[in-house]
Image (cartoon, helix red, strand yellow):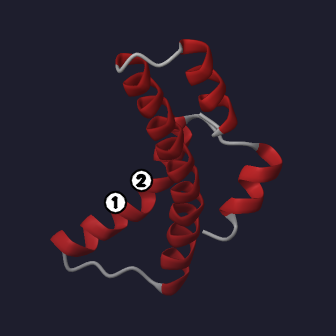
């Protein structure tokens, strides 16, 4: 996860499809081990763990943006000024 923070800061957040694609190897390897007698080695666990950790940082960024936008929509439904809500969303990184 620590590797994902500087990547997100310097290069930004990739598309959500890429984030999901980075998570798939760990999930696939885990289910394969659970459902069969296969057991992965340390190198494979290291690589899939690094990819998943980096993707998890990006997923948390997407979740944060979703929460900020949802809060903005709720505020607008409750009668808040749309301009103020838009400013709030920008200031919180939504």
Q: Is residue 7 left or right of residue 66?
A: right
Q: Quadrant of the N terminus?
A: bottom right
Q: Based on the displayed image, in which of its 4 quarters is residue 79 positioned? A: top left
Calculate the distance from the C-alpha at mark 2 to the C-alpha at mark 1. 6 Å
Instruction: Please tell me whether mark 1 sits on a helix, a strand or a loop.
Output: helix
The one of 10 and 22 positioned closer to us in this rendering? 10
Q: Residue tagged by mark 2?
A: 24
Q: Are marks 2 and 1 in contact (CB under 8 Å)?
A: yes
Question: Can you say whether 3 is above or below 74 in the image?
Answer: below
Q: Residue at x 53, y 38 (%)?
A: 65
Q: Residue tagged by mark 1?
A: 28
Q: Is residue 33 left or right of residue 22?
A: left
The one of 44 and 88 positioned closer to us in this rendering? 88
The one of 55 and 90 positioned closer to us in this rendering? 90
Where residue 10 appears, as percent x and y from the top left, is: 83, 50
Which of the labelled discs sits on residue 66, or is there none? Answer: none
Q: Residue furthest bottom?
A: 42
Question: Can you say whether 62 is above or below 74 in the image?
Answer: below
Q: Is residue 34 left or right of residue 70?
A: left
Where residue 19 appears, as percent x and y from the top left, is: 53, 45
Where residue 21 appears, as percent x and y from the top left, is: 49, 46
Question: Can you say whether 41 is above or below 74 in the image?
Answer: below
Q: Quadrant of the C terminus?
A: top right
């Amino acid at each position: 996860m620590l590797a994902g923070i500087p990547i997100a800061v310097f290069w930004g957040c990739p598309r959500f499809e890429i984030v999901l694609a980075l998570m798939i190897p760990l999930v696939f390897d885990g289910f394969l081990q659970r459902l069969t007698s296969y057991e992965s080695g340390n190198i494979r666990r290291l690589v899939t763990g690094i990819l998943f950790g980096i993707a998890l940082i990006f997923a948390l960024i997407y979740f944060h943006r979703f929460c900020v936008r949802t809060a903005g929509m709720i505020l607008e439904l409750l009668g808040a000024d749309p301009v103020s809500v838009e400013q709030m969303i920008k200031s919180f990184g939504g």
